Image (cartoon, grey):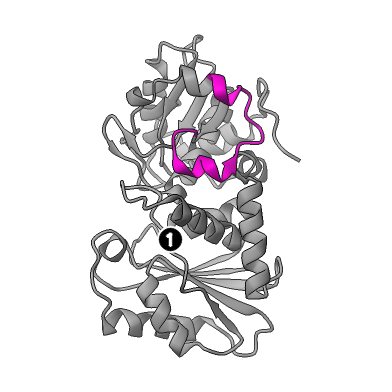
Amino acid sequence: MFFSNSKPNYGNSVRTKFTKMLDNMVPFTALNNPRLKKVVNLFQKRYTNGNSMGFGDYIRGSLSLVQICQIHNLQFDMNYVNHPVSKFLTNTTNNDDLSIQSNSINYNGVSMFTDNNFDRNDKTYHKRMIDLLNSVTTSHYYLFCNSFPIVDPSPTQRRIVASKIQPNEVLQEAILGTMSELGLERGGYRIIHIRTGDRYLLNNARLDANLINKVVTTINKNVSRLSPFKYLILSDNVELKKVLSTIYSTDKFVIQIDKSITHLGEGAIKDDESVKNTLVDFFLLAQSNAIISMSPYLHESSFSKYCGILFGIPNIFNRLDIPI
């Protein structure tokens, strides 16, 4: 089931799709660096040029990098040994001994790739990334990438990334315990995921009637009262969940209000328990049968969007017209 991270012999389907996307407008940039063998997307709290982005951004960038590696026949890996998520996740297809890897990496020297393709139709992103990789002087290159995939990720690419962020025994127990407590079965419920944004999560903006009204209107528009499924409401805003628990108090809706969560980037991490709870939310998303997501950001919520992409869960996005 899982990808073996030995030397890849990839087919050319990704390269073919990518070159078609270029429409002959931008020359294909070749990798001319025989020394480079492996590219690793490394997740930690800080880099030489700033704090990390969130977990969804990390997944998005990993899907982008695995495509780059497939185009150029490089090995790909993910490393989060130096991030608190490592206490709850395991990389089941890592090709290197993590203890050796942990001791040999200069974590203080890792940088974020910032020349991103915020528009997926950006036809020069590939050249910018390859120019960087052509300048690398080592066999393994470590960076943080949150770029967008070049083309829609294939099932193989999704499996590669998913195999590298598997829950360990502690997290599995927490996921199963939460599902049992909430009366949820895999594939038997839907998620309403509400990302109110960093204005609330990081800057502690107060909850207001405008936000509540817009969220309630969006939920009512998307939820069928005749649906046989339960709806689990997840949000980065604990105060909002408390309000919604008084509005949606029937058995059809499930809301947990007693567990803290945290942003896994932006220097905002609270404690290990919050990290674990946030990852439980991620894997609850992964075991649902549909995601109804809300966010004030045009790029949606990477946390729910790329969870859906990674595990093949349909996602209906609703933009919240609220201050960012």
Q: Quadrant of residue 113?
A: top left
Q: Is residue 315 left or right of residue 95?
A: left
The residue at the far right in this view is 1
Give the magenta-colored segment's residue range: 81-100
Which x, y percent locates residue 149? 48, 43
Q: Is residue 53 left or right of residue 35?
A: left
The answer, for residue 19, to whether it is visible in the render is no
Disc tally is: 1
Residue toward you, 153 or 5: 5
Which x, y percent locates residue 222? 51, 81
Q: Is residue 307 above or below residue 160?
A: below
Density class for disc 1 (Cα within 10 Å; few <14, some 14-19, many ≥20) is many
Residue toward you, 123 or 139: 139
Residue drawn at (62%, 61%) of the image? 313
Which residue does the numbered mark 1 point to in the structure image? 261
Which x, y percent locates residue 177? 65, 64
Residue drawn at (47%, 71%) of the image? 258
Q: Is residue 322 left or right of residue 133?
A: left
Q: Is residue 61 above or below residue 48?
A: below
Residue toward you, 220 or 124: 220
Q: Quadrant of residue 50?
A: top left
Which x, y percent locates residue 23? 46, 38
Q: Is residue 231 above or below residue 178?
A: below
Does residue 5 belong to the magenta stretch? no
Q: Is residue 60 above or below residue 26?
A: below
Does residue 95 belong to the magenta stretch? yes
Residue toward you, 284 or 81: 81
**Badge 1 element:** loop
Kind of residue at disc 1: Ile
The quadrant the C terminus occupies is: bottom left
The quadrant the N terminus occupies is: top right
Residue drawn at (47%, 55%) of the image? 273
